[in-house]
Image (cartoon, rainbow, N blue to C red):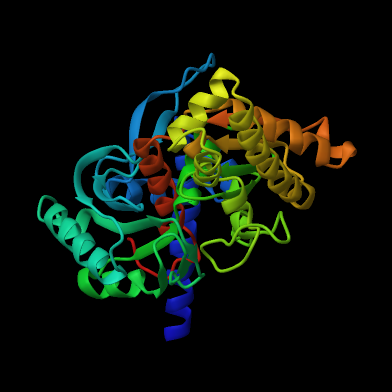
Amino acid sequence: MNGQVGNVHLMQKLNRLKVLSCIRKNPYIVRPAVAEQTGLSLASITNIVSFLIEKGLVVETGFENAERIGRKAVLLKFCPSEHNLICVSISQSRISVSLTDLDGKILQTKDFDFSEQSAKEALLKIKSGISALIAEVDPSKLLGIGIAVSALVLSDGTLAVSSKMRWDKTDLKGELEKEFNKPVFVTDSSVARAHYCNEFVSGENIRSMLFVDLVDGVGAVHFYEGHLNRSVIGEIGHTTVEKDGDECFCGNRGCLEIMCSLERAGEQYKKSGKGKSIDDVIKGYESGEKTAVALLNRAGEYLGIGMANAVNVLNPDAVIINAGQYQGCTAVLDVAIDEARRRIFSALSDGIEFKTAEISDSMMIEGMAQNLCECIFDINFDGEIF
């Protein structure tokens, strides 16, 4: 008997999540269309939608614009404002803790300066920020906490390594779930930015998207048919593009991340006696100074090699490059794209669209919220959001 009750409860949860997902992805949809897309009966849809409205996850919003006789169907829309998320962004210089709605609209933010500090010190600041924001809302309305950090994140949410910040095997998920008794999802910052691009930048008719992130290194994220490809860990920054190249933060040599970095170009420019900083090499590049042009073109070529390697494995329709460290020198990205096109299989090259983007911090928070909702409203999530 208990098994039967458990199975009924599970099926009820799966159907509710199926309907909620359909409404989230299809704003202003009517109940018959939800029934058609989910394969559930109209009676089941009516019951489930009533439940979701009661929980504040769905709202009715006007009537369909249909030229037909009879009563017009009521439009349904996902409601992001009745519940909250907390999105934590960790970079080399700052920790930002934001309270958002389910669409990623920022309601409040707590910022902390952060540089060359340990994971333990970071955790104390994160807990402080989360505690302050939770005090401002009804805790029952908080569905989850998302952490975005530039690091290799294992499937259990543990940070395997963050070479830039020198963190190793840090269990942010376990620590925060124990402290706040809310589901915590940890992801690479590049994934959060890629979610934003998948939703708002990639465009229609893009079946396979490769997102290349140039913030805090070089990361890659793959979306296929609108869904994150979680089997791709995206650490292309630590693939080798020069056998005996410079030593990387990770301990290897010749990694893409170090060979294409502006820091490396700036250091080489300084050694040549032409300037003292990254800004100097960028100014030199823009003015056509030969050493600066050679250094940054070489950095762009390395980046192009790395992108071509990823393209030849994943075969995307579009490559979106978040300018990141190259925002002040986007001409180098043109060099990288040209180099990538030369190295991509000719059968693939013509059909690939390259785009550049500049994903702001607020855009990344929206992407974090998208990712967090995908995790919380996933049928495989073993928590009980209802």
Q: Quadrant of the C terminus?
A: bottom left
Q: Residue furthest top?
A: 67
Q: Nearer the viewer, residue 368 or 342?
A: 342
Residue 43: where, in percent of width, then height? Answer: 47, 48
Work out whether residue 74 can be spotted: yes
- The structure residue drawn at horizontal position 58% and vertical position 31%, both measured from the top left corner, is 292
Horizontal side of residue 65 vs 61, given as left or right: right
Work out whether residue 234 can be spotted: no
Q: Nearer the viewer, residue 240 or 383?
A: 240
- The structure residue drawn at horizontal position 34% and vertical position 64%, both measured from the top left corner, is 184
Say which quarter of the image contains residue 109.
top left
- The structure residue drawn at horizontal position 80% and vertical position 31%, both measured from the top left corner, is 351
- The answer to whether residue 355 is above or below residue 127 is above
Q: Quadrant of the N terminus?
A: bottom left
Horizontal side of residue 88 vs 111, given as left or right: right
Q: How many marks?
A: 0
Q: Nearer the viewer, residue 77 or 120?
A: 120
- The structure residue drawn at horizontal position 19% and vertical position 58%, both measured from the top left corner, is 130
Say which quarter of the image contains residue 171.
bottom left
- The answer to whether residue 225 is above or below residue 134 is above
Residue 165: where, in percent of width, then height? Answer: 39, 62
Q: Nearer the viewer, residue 243 or 53?
A: 243
Residue 166: where, in percent of width, then height? Answer: 41, 67
Residue 35: where, in percent of width, then height? Answer: 54, 44
Q: Residue furthest right?
A: 347
Horizontal side of residue 345 vs 46, given as left or right: right
